[in-house]
Amino acid sequence: MSPDKLWLETPLIRSTHISSLLGCNVYLKLDTLQPPQSFKARGISHYAQHAVRTHGPGVHLIIASGGNAGLAAAWAAKVLGVKCTVYLPHAASQSTIDFLRKDGAEVVIGGDYYLQALQRAQQAVEADPNAVMVPAYDDPILWEGHASLVHEIKSQLPEGNAPDAIFCSVGGGGLAAGIMEGCRAVGWDDVPLVAVETHGSNCFYQSLSLNEGPFTGKVESRKVPEGTSAEYNKEHNVTVAHIAKLTSRATSLGATSPSAGAVEMALKRSGGVKSVCVSDELAMQACLSFTEDHKTLVELACAVTLAPAYNPTLFRALVPHIDKPATVVFIVCGGFKISLEDLKEYERIVEAEFAAGGEWDVAFNGQGIKIPKVR
Amino acid sequence: MYPDKLWLETPLVKSVHISSLLGCDAYLKFETLQPPQSFKARGISHFAQHAVRTHGPGVHLMIASSGNAGLAAAWAAKALGVKCTVYLPHGASQSTIDFMRKDGADVVVAGSYYLEAYRRAKQAAEADPSAVLVPSYNDPVLWDGHASLIHDLRQQLPDGTTPDAIFCSAGGGGLAGGIMTGCKAVGWDHVPVVTVETHGSNCFYQSLSLNDGPFVGIAESRKISEGTTAQHDQEHDVNVAHLDKLTSRATSLGATSPSAAVVKMALQRAGGIKSVCVSDEVTMQACLSFAEDHKTLVELACAVTLTPAYDPTLFRALVPPSDKPATVVFVLCGGFKISLQDLKEYERIVEAELAAGGEWDIALNGQNFTIPKAGWDR
């Protein structure tokens, strides 16, 4: 892609463990290895470079973020030698603040919630002619940077074969939009995309549900969950869900409404979209299994993508059996909000789930399915 | 250089955390990402390809290993479509055995310790004309494969940058051999190499001690540890230590005597060698810190390399400060033998060490010193 790109071409590794479990060729795109430890390095540094080109080297990058986007912005600004200020709410952890400062960003803490930090960031941008607001997920320049993921996968897969499915997490839809754009660019518009969220943070799923498309049945027949309001977006001619509050522990998914552009793309593409919601606890189990197999800690929002990797029944519902072994790619999007303490807690929670018995609830394109709890 | 190589050119990542802690440009070479999850993918697949070229596609690869070498052989054999049998001593973990079988290897569990498994492997290889015994660390073809690491580094470091030091673990010396071979090939023979072992598994350190060279004073003045016998290797004209037993928990270092050729390489190179021994416990602390910072679990034998990364005092003893920030590379050699259970245990052990107070014991090129036990912010 861009010759002076700042992000790393990360490895695409074949997972012996997951391939063996699922009976197909499973590849992992390890964006955990980006310098700011998540895929956001791509789109955000691409955006930052664009800002420097259009505003000059005196540009001041501003972002409101509790996490990975802020970190990516701080890193990109440092590499480009430009100023960066990250606005965080009071709840931000000390390790987040330290990590941002190690990368030279100025950190401004204010406000009890993210929205308040965002407001302060917006005020700062208005007050400073050199300032540019770095978007979190809803911008075509961001998606262009994220799309590099797909270009790399194409050159890295053996014999450049198109995968039978690509799996990714969805928060606001920035990653998904980048993947869909990248697929279109390399002739993979028909490659199925599986977009995974949690029940407690599923604005993308809910938005798809508000439109005619891949979901079973008609829009009118589908109930709109309490606390969600529907909004029609004229520019993209789609209806978008606004969720009152997020209740999931996968906080980095963190969007109460998705990018309308991303929703539109998903509804239009020939490969369609398989929108899945899983419980936090199922994501925790996948997180733990991945750590044991691949010796890599991933935050919950990233482990969400891996829930089908560690549950053959769910995987089979998403990637129907074909006569030759499928080739699938899981985007391991990364994120730094995971610790050994978290994992201990997840172990306790998952054990309790197994002790309670029963099955996991999964939502898939408008249908509720149950999958067995397996260790 | 390696046209049909099977291993990955793994990422070289600049660590913000470690660079900030040490005040230098610290890079991590992520060999954890090789398909069999350790650097052994390089030398062992290189050896396997060589075996297929010389013995044909009917070759049967055999190896005795308690872990990572066996995993690398199983993976390489699968990639090349040849048969592989791994001989493991009793006590090898089920997850390691499962991993090998997932890659299609036959696994024979035999003997109560490595040497017995090795004897069984050797017998089997002698009995089978199509069999080739894959060495664990002592073979130039292995080092040639491992040397690819350095070729990667040369491409991956910012243009024209020569590292001020390369850090690696030393078990039998295969990795160190590869690093030194590679350095020589790319004009880095003068680049300092720091090898790190544990006090309870330090055959390389002890071997260097038996020779005149980088160690302080002369060989005769240095005491030989109890339980160690010195042997003169004629072919390489160097003294090599044979340890009775290993007492370290960093079991993947697992060699009671190192490669004589690699010891010789270390004594002869222009950049010299800095041979360091640390305790299991300070290694555990580095392992935990690395997991928190880099979200990556590494086995103890790999974490050993990171002990200077997490201790500025030790680092400065190894890389003296100069007028510009140093560029250093830590080779994250990888390894499969680490679990969340292990980390919980390491936390308890390290907490107890910190509560007990005192300092960590370090050995460096024949000198013993101590460094303060620092807590960590969790």
Image: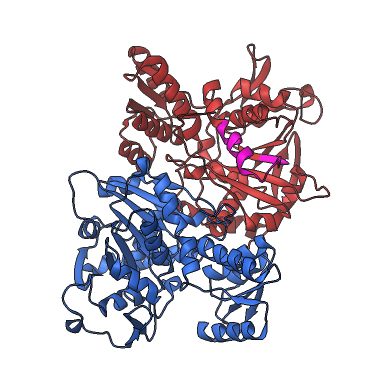
- Magenta segment range? B147-166
Q: Residue at x 30, y 34 (%)?
A: B104
Tell me if I can see residue A217 in this picture: yes
Q: Residue at x 55, y 43 (%)?
A: B302
Tell me residue B353's x, y (percent). Answer: 62, 55
Chain A, colour shown: blue
Tell me residue B43's x, y (percent). Answer: 50, 29
Q: Is residue A325 left or right of residue B21?
A: left
Tell me if I can see residue B172 in this picture: no
Tell me residue B363's x, y (percent). Answer: 71, 39
| Quadrant (top left/top right/bottom left/bottom right) for the C terminus of chain A | bottom left
Q: Is residue B149 magenta?
A: yes
Q: Does residue A92 lie above or below B123 as drawn? A: below
Q: Is residue B13 left or right of residue A346?
A: right
Q: Residue at x 33, y 25 (%)?
A: B82
Q: Is residue B147 left or right of residue B50?
A: right
Q: Quadrant of residue A189?
A: bottom left
B8 or B175, which is in the foreground?
B8
A207 or A305, which is in the foreground?
A207
Q: Residue at x 46, y 41 (%)?
A: B34
